[in-house]
Amino acid sequence: MTWQLMALIVGTLTLVPYTVNASEPTPKIAAQPEFNQVHVKIIMPTEPADHHKNRPVVESWIAEDMKILGQAKFTAVTGWVRLDLSPLGATDVWGGTLGDRHHCPVGADIPERSEDRMKVHLSGWSPGGACVTVSLKNEPGSRVVAAVKQYENTYKTFKGMPYVAVLIGPPVEKPSAETIRKN
């Protein structure tokens, strides 16, 4: 019995220093960079009254830019669609249906992103794959309206060409520990 007691004491004394070393805090993992959110909206050249009354809203800044670009009659065919921010991710933006007209679906991705600028690429609209790439500042509040000029002659039969609006928003906020309620 004394041997067992001695073995227990010696074992405890030799293991305690190793346990103390193992309880040091683990190093902090580098936080993932938070990216600004990117939203796109598809605008088509058509009378808003030609189709459903419940179409998405066209914001005033988009309407002003559309008039500067020479397009007076237009309607939004999508609301604001948030793009996938992963490097290999792409987002389906629009299914391609506008009333009784069928276009090809439109997808979007972000092929280039740096701290100060980014490029947003959208493609679809026709079997030939019309596309538009816009470059803008990578900061919340940046916005641009761009024409899909690649198939300008094709879309003249549809009373104009499609447009895209791109808007940069702030990163999604993650709830802090203080805002999480504990029951």
Image: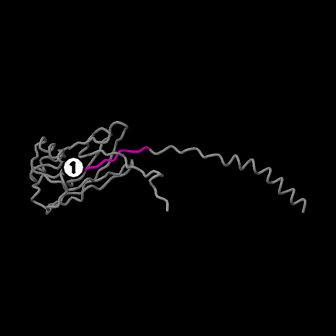
Q: Which secondary structure, mark 1? A: strand
Q: Residue at x 21, y 49 (%)?
A: 130
Query: What percent of the width, then of the height, locates residue 6?
Result: 87, 56
Q: Which residue is mark 1?
A: 130
Total numbered labels placed on residues in the image: 1
Q: Which residues are magenta?
A: 33-40
Q: Nearer the viewer, residue 130 or 22?
A: 22
Magenta-span inclusion, residue 164: no
Q: Residue at x 27, y 41 (%)?
A: 142
> How is the model colour-coded?
one colour
Badge 1 crowding class, 10 Å Cα cut-off, few under 14, some 14 to 19, many 20 or more, is some
Residue 54 appears in which quarter of the rendering? bottom left
Query: What percent of the width, then of the height, locates residue 156?
Result: 10, 49
Q: Nearer the viewer, residue 109 or 179?
A: 179
Q: Residue at x 17, y 58 (%)?
A: 55
**Does residue 72 appear left or right of residue 8 in this picture?**
left
Residue positioned most to the top: 116
Query: What percent of the width, then of the height, locates residue 61?
Result: 18, 44
Query: What percent of the width, then of the height, locates residue 16?
Result: 75, 50
Magenta-span inclusion, residue 36: yes
Query: Which of the image's four quarters has the N terminus?
Result: bottom right
Q: Amino acid at mark 1?
A: Ala
